[in-house]
Image (tube, rainbow, N blue to C red):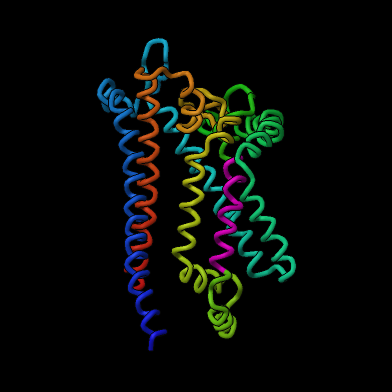
Amino acid sequence: MTYLTSIKARHRTADPFFRWLAIASGCGTLVIVSAIIAVMVAGGWKAFTVFGPRFLIANVWNPVTQQFGAAAPLFGTLASSVFAMIVAVPLAFGTTFWLTMIAPPRLFSVVSMAVQLLAAIPSIIFGMWGVLVVVPFVAHVAQPFAQWLFGSTPILSALVTGPRFGTGLLTTAFVLAIMITPSMTAVLCDVFTAIPPVLRESGYGIGATRWEVVRYIMLPYSREGFIGSIVLGMGRAMGETMAVTFVIGDNNHISWSLFAPTNSIASLIALEFPESPTGSLKLASLLALGAILMAISFFTLWCSRWLLTRGSLARC
């Protein structure tokens, strides 16, 4: 009787402590995120008041004349991330499909471990690899071939024009795609392996092919994890700094050419922040860019949650 009484006393003591610890952790997270947003918005408010809505569409970044605009880095961030996702999503899905549906168990364990190791490589290593391998390849092989193939086409010729620097939007998108593919593949492998085997076996039992099992059974069952991996890759691509800084070219102008140097929000902040005096309009513009990047990230997350909610309602 005494033993049971002591257990109940410990439970009465531990449960409220755990409850308040959980509440404090949740509230602490909200406070930290709110503080970051407040710092970005308050620091960039000067730029928003000086330039107004024109700050979002101005294609200029000139510290000498104190004229700043977010159009060029915003375009570079969105375009490079979208192009990277166009390459990374099919590559990650194909790798996951082979690992979980075709590869032998021993090979699956080895390759999946290698994928997880690739996901842990620092981004600066991908940037160095991009400078040493991808940039020369784009400058001496990819862009000359694209100009020879599409140089005479009226519309497509504008996408391949420009000097053969090797750095630019397409190079950045390729490096980002290679960088985020292992992370997305690792998440998708965990999601697919968590699906109950009886679901796949029931599909094979009624004569479905591997693709039909994936298309009609595994993908609907793992919708949340699949969209989560895409959001994870998109978020890392938009917020990547060092790898992008190495290969994007650092040019604050918008160009139609896929091979033209451009800039992103993260790389511009990394390059210009140390040279921005406290209280200057340049520093305020950089903080405003940070606030815009956070807004884009929140909007991406909201879109993913909306897609998940819509899918859940459709299944009901």
Q: Which residue is depicted at the point 64% across and 24% down?
A: 164
State the predominant SS element of the stretch in magenta.
helix
- Residue 224 position within the rendered picture, expressed as x and y whole percent measured from the top left: 44, 63
Residue 97 lies left or right of residue 308; in this view the side is right
Residue found at x 35% / y 68%: 312
Indicate the quadrant where residue 73 lies.
Answer: top left
The segment highlighted magenta reads: 175-192
Q: Is residue 177 magenta?
A: yes
In which quarter of the view is residue 157 placed?
top right
Looking at the image, residue 274 lies above or below residue 245: above
- Look at 64% across and 55% down and name the residue there: 116
* Coordinates of residue 143 in the picture (x, y in percent): 64, 31
Residue 153 belongs to the span the image colors magenta:
no
Percent across and percent down for residue 260 are 55, 27
* Residue at 33% across, 55% down: 24
Which residue occupies the foreground of this view, 314 or 281?
281
